[in-house]
Image (tube, helix red, strand yellow):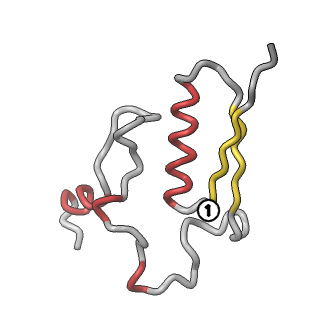
Amino acid sequence: MAVQTHTVAIIGMGSRGLSILEQLIGMSRHANQQPLQIEVFDPQPPGSGLHSAQQPDYLMLNTMAGQLSAFSSEFPACEPAGWTFLQWCSAQDAR
C-alpha cells in the first residue's frame, strides 16, 4: 500500500504564517510518520522580514500585544511555553 503524502499550504509568512509553520513542524514530530509537504505562498521577497517596511506607524505590530507570543500554548513545539509579548512588556515596565 502506498503511503499518502499530505500537502498543506501556508498563505503568507508573516508572524501568523511562521506560527502555523512552527505548529505543523511540532505536530508532525508526534504524528504517525506520514509524509507532510508544506507549500508556502508569499508575495514578499525572501528575507524581507515579518512586516512590510512601509507599514504605517499606527500598525507597528499588526496584532494586539496580548496575542503575540513566540510560544504556542495549544500544541507546544518547544517547551516550556513562555510569556506573551504584553506580559514581557509589563515585566520590563515597557510602555
Q: Residue at x 73, y 69 (%)?
A: 45
- Front position in the image: 74 or 55: 74
- Front position in the image: 43 or 54: 43
Q: Position of residue 3 (x, y in %)?
A: 76, 20
Say few, some or many: other residues with alpha carbon within 10 Å of mark 1 (under 14 / 14 to 19 / 20 or more). some
Q: Is residue 63 left or right of residue 89?
A: right
Q: Residue at x 39, y 43 (%)?
A: 72
- The residue indicated by pointer 1 is 12
Q: Residue at x 64, y 20 (%)?
A: 33
Q: Is residue 44 left or right of residue 32?
A: right
Quadrant placement of the C terminus: bottom left
Q: Is residue 66 left or right of residue 31?
A: left
Quadrant placement of the N terminus: top right
Q: Amino acid at mark 1?
A: Gly
Q: Position of residue 71 (x, y in %)?
A: 39, 45
Task: Determine the image quadrant of residue 11.
Answer: bottom right
Q: Residue at x 51, y 40 (%)?
A: 23
- Front position in the image: 77 or 33: 33
The vertical placement of 72 against 50, above or below, is above
Task: Determine the image quadrant of residue 85.
Answer: bottom left
Task: Determine the image quadrant of residue 73.
Answer: top left
Q: Residue lying at the far top in this picture: please name it.
A: 1
